[in-house]
Image (cartoon, rainbow, N blue to C red):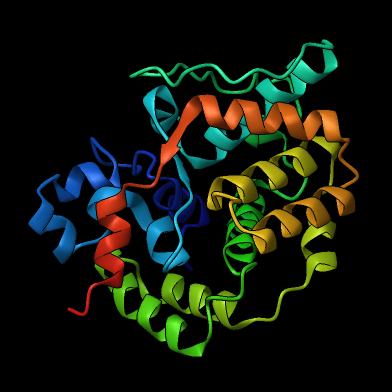
């Protein structure tokens, strides 16, 4: 069985457990290396998104790991919302600071009722569902994606899981039901928003529908949006371009 938490780390470009850097750091920064390995500049999310591009965590967030980074973003947005603050997008600093959610809060990975690994799978499914929202991942695109997933060094079980999820029809009710707490509903939406830029009508419509199913108020969604914008950067353009190249 593959490690869902490690796969989520790779999706977000976070530190890989047992190594000293991120997927893209390990691969190198040269343009040619990015062409040989799209993960070098944009993490596994760029592969899953195919012709699209989402946002990836940066600064201190990449050191937290995927679960803690998503939990930290969701917790920060939720706290600002509960405090009655006005959503505001701060300029992205070179090394934006993001703290992990406090251990005693339901946003901390250890507090997941279904266990950390199972909730990591839910967040991965949320990101894939969001990536499929605009309909561009058809059978041909899926094969193209799977052909590049091997570049991430994933084992057969992880590749098979991604293949199944990419091929499965969107089931929003099932996805929403996997969020067991209010905190997890906020995290599920946060992960979905990280996966896409939401600059198409289909993507924006999907996120609106997801927020409604999760019963998240508009003002909280605004805080999530502002928090994500302040702690992430767009997936690198050269990674997306590499995915489109004919090689």
Is 67 situated left or right of 97 in this image? right
- In which quadrant is the C terminus drawn? bottom left
Residue 42 on image: x %, y %: 33, 50
24 or 41: which is nearer to us? 41
Identify which residue, 228 or 200, lies in the foreground: 200
* Image point (26%, 49%), residue name: 41
Q: Is residue 93 above or below residue 243?
A: above
- At x 70%, y 54%, the residue is 204
Q: Could one spot residue 194 in this view of the protein?
A: yes
Residue 67, how many percent across, how many down?
56, 40
When asked about the image quadrant of residue 134, the answer is: bottom right
Does residue 235 appear to the left or right of 219 in the view shown?
A: left
Q: Residue furthest bottom?
A: 139
Q: Is residue 139 left or right of residue 168?
A: left
**Of residues 206 and 1, the one drawn nearer to the viewer in this rendering:** 206
**Camera sees residue 72:** no
């Amino acid at each position: 069985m593959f490690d869902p938490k490690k796969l989520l780390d790779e999706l977000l470009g976070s530190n890989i457990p047992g190594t000293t850097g991120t997927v893209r750091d390990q691969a190198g920064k040269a343009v040619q290396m990015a062409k040989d390995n799209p993960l070098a500049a944009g993490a596994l999310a760029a592969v899953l998104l195919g012709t699209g591009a989402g946002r990836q965590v940066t600064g201190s967030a990449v050191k937290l790991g995927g679960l803690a980074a998503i939990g930290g973003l969701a917790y920060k947005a939720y706290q600002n919302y509960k405090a009655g603050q006005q959503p505001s997008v701060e300029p992205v600093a070179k090394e934006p600071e993001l703290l992990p959610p406090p251990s005693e809060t339901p946003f901390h990975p250890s507090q997941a009722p279904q266990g950390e690994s199972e909730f990591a799978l839910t967040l991965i499914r949320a990101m894939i569902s969001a990536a499929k929202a605009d309909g561009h991942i058809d059978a041909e695109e899926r094969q193209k994606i799977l052909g590049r997933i091997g570049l991430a060094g994933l084992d057969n079980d992880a590749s098979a899981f991604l293949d199944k999820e990419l091929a499965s029809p969107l089931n929003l009710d099932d996805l929403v039901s996997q969020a067991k707490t209010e905190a997890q509903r906020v995290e599920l939406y946060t992960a979905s928003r990280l996966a896409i830029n939401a600059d198409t009508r289909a993507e924006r419509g999907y996120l609106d529908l997801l927020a409604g199913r999760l019963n998240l108020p508009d003002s909280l969604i605004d805080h999530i949006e502002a928090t994500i914008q302040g702690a992430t950067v767009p997936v690198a353009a050269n990674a997306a371009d590499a995915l489109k190249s004919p090689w």
